[in-house]
Image (cartoon, coloured by chain):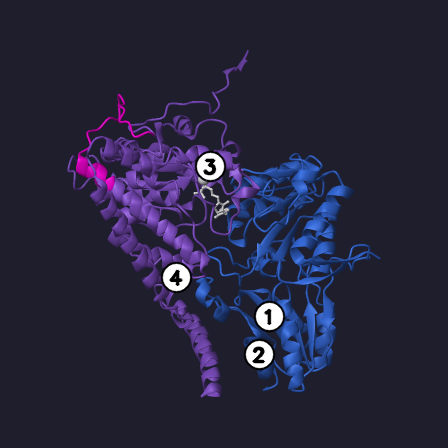
Amino acid sequence: MSITTMSLAKALNAGLRRSMEDDEKVVVMGEDVGTLGGVFRITDGLKKDFGDDRVIDTPLAESGIVGTAVGLAMRGYRPVVEIQFDGFVYPAYDQIVCQVAKLHFRSQGRIRIPMVIRIPFGGGIGAVEHHSESPEAQFVHTPGLKVVACSNPADAYAMIQQAIRSDDPVVFLEPKRLYHSTKADVDTDADPAPLWQSRVVRPGSDATLVAYGPTVSTCLDAAPVAAEEGRSLEVIDLRTLSPLDLVPVIESVRRTGRLVVVHEAHLTLGLGAEIAARVTEECFHALEAPVLRVGGYDTPYPPARIEEAWLPDLDRVLDAVDRTFGF
Amino acid sequence: MTDPVFGPAPAQDTDPELVQLLTPEGERVHHPTFDLDFSADQVRAFYRDMVLVRRLDIEATALQRHGELGLWAQLLGQEAAQIGAGRALRPQDFVFPTYREHGVAWCRGVDPVRLLALFRGVDQGSWDPAEHNFGLYTIVIGAQTLHATGYAMGVQRDGAVGTGDPDRDTAVVAHFGDGASSQGDVNEAFVFAASYNAPVVFFCQNNQWAISEPFERQSRIPLYRRAQGFGFPGVRVDGNDVLATYAVTRAALQRARDGQGPTLIEAYTYRMGAHTTTDDPTRYRLTDDVERWKLKDPIARVEAYLRRNGLADDGFVEQVAADADELGERMRRECHALPDPSLHDVFDAVHAEQTAELAAQQASYDAHVASFEEVTA
Ligand SMILES: Cc1ncc(C[n+]2csc(CCOP(=O)(O)OP(=O)(O)O)c2C)c(N)n1
Ligand SMILES: [Mg+2]
């Protein structure tokens, strides 16, 4: 056992470093990832230790970054691409959706794209426009991509390495507001849980909360408050959004009869919609109330001074929990 | 190096021609193509603009340090490029800025407090673009260059080029940075502008840095030479020389208004500050570089020129400093007084025609807020 206390940012950095040590084909590329170590310092020190052949500061062009990463992957490399902020993934959208996602299919498996596209996502950091978005549903809606979201340092450390080892392209979402705010023990020798599994992070018996990325901590904060009112909430961290692992969710809802899904992404056609549909199919007779969703409103992300009112917070989560008991 | 088959590689960025009318020492020099006569009033006005805009920038940076702004993108060092480009405009010309064009905004009559509101997180741009002929700040790198080109295509269709009427013929300016020159959008804008001979001036402030990445990461040849390959002229101007920037921009704008098509101007300058207030440039660049560029300060050279030629005295310089103090004081006062927006209003801003769905979400948000008021009441 080798336990170190790390921030989520540091855990990602350590995970990337480990992957680069384990496999010389792993290359990191993106804007400012080299000398600067990335605007969030996730790649801090990697260029110094692995050189600029493996830690590549790219020209300022996201389509170029992802497009050239496709070529590197075809040449046997495992590119780990950093998109600087969620809102800047869109210039690369065409490459991701039409090329990264489809090459395996188009070539009947002859071509593999073992690429990881890291995206700091979500709001709550007081930023200007385009720096607080939650684009996950667009990628979950794209066959051929896998999408995961970490929510804590231990997962971040393990999941980034697992994503890099995957032979399929993985969109790797990082809750940027937790980068430096959460510290936790990470056992760097532990055998990690499989990447494609969601997990119960707090057991409970009266209602189920499902979250991923930044909203996991919101739900974990809500649970003790609800407990004071005599309600025991079970919290599930999805971790993998595509494929979506609803086994623990369905098992949980069969016991609790109530489900609230919480994400920062816009409500309409967000992950909550898909989860509600599947859980309704699987748990129809167990449900005591309709599946409720708490999400960002269907407006563009608002100016920073009012983002806290826009984001799902403790009050909106607890309010939804209340409503599930009102049916 | 000359390849036996393909011939010489284009020269790297050694010492390309740089249009200059005022040396860093404040000496007036002449240029065969871009020389202009400047009146003393004009030069004094440039000086005043630059001093005020620098104060605007320093004041905003200080406001960010005090927690009043979420972020600020400094223009420090780029005053001449922006004032030269901004003052060369005619009222009917239209400008598409990045997020750093505070000096151009100034020239277009946008109140600096509007810029503070954006960086404070009160709104995402609250000036009326049509009133100032100045578009909203664009953060997605390069996107606005296509908008500028399309706007210029509209100008063509309105018959507002090449009529010879100085109040009608219109040019459009697309601002962008050296980093942006790598984006697909910018290169597509070049293609469209060339294809339609659109009346657009591409104004690139090459401040040598795109956050931590030096210019060499984006281009192996001087940027202005890229224009050649797209089929229109390019020119590199000393971006720390307000007279040269003004003269070159004026000529390019007139070319566009006359119907002769696009021009690329590379204003060669330096980002003296951090990328933004969250950046730490000591991680990636040498202070030596910054010190070298300090000697090319855009304001000092104009002051030297004015004083040496007896065109400005202490009284003038002190008056400008006092105006700057007043501006700084007003910015602080009005920044503190900026009201927070309401999320209720956000729902109304999404569409021209509100949808029933969104109105229902707005109502549920209002009810949620009201439920707390009941509790506290
Ligand atoms: C599409 C996109 N990618 C990344 C960013 C993040 N970003 C903001 S400014 C910047 C560097 C821009 O450099 P340059 O074009 O030279 O302009 P400067 O900031 O130097 O004025 C980057 C990478 C962005 N805003 N938009
Ligand atoms: Mg730049």
The mark found on residue B290 in the picture is: 3
Magenta span main SS: loop
Q: Position of residue B173 (x, y in %)?
A: 32, 41
Residue sitting at x 45%, y 57%: B65
Disc 1 to disc 2, C-alpha distance: 10 Å
Q: Nearer the viewer, mark 3 or mark 4?
A: 3
- Magenta-colored span: B25-46
Q: Residue furthest right?
A: A1
Residue pointed to by mark 4: B123
Question: Residue B197 versus residue B271: which sits nearer the camera?
Answer: B271
Q: Which residue is mark 2?
A: A320
Write down the residue under mark 1. A262
Label 2 Cα neighbours within 10 Å, binned few <14 / some 14-19 / many ≥20: many
* Residue B3 versus residue B122 in the image, above or below: above
Q: Which residue is found at the position 59% from the left and 51% from the top?
A: A40
Mark closer to the observer (1, 3) = 3
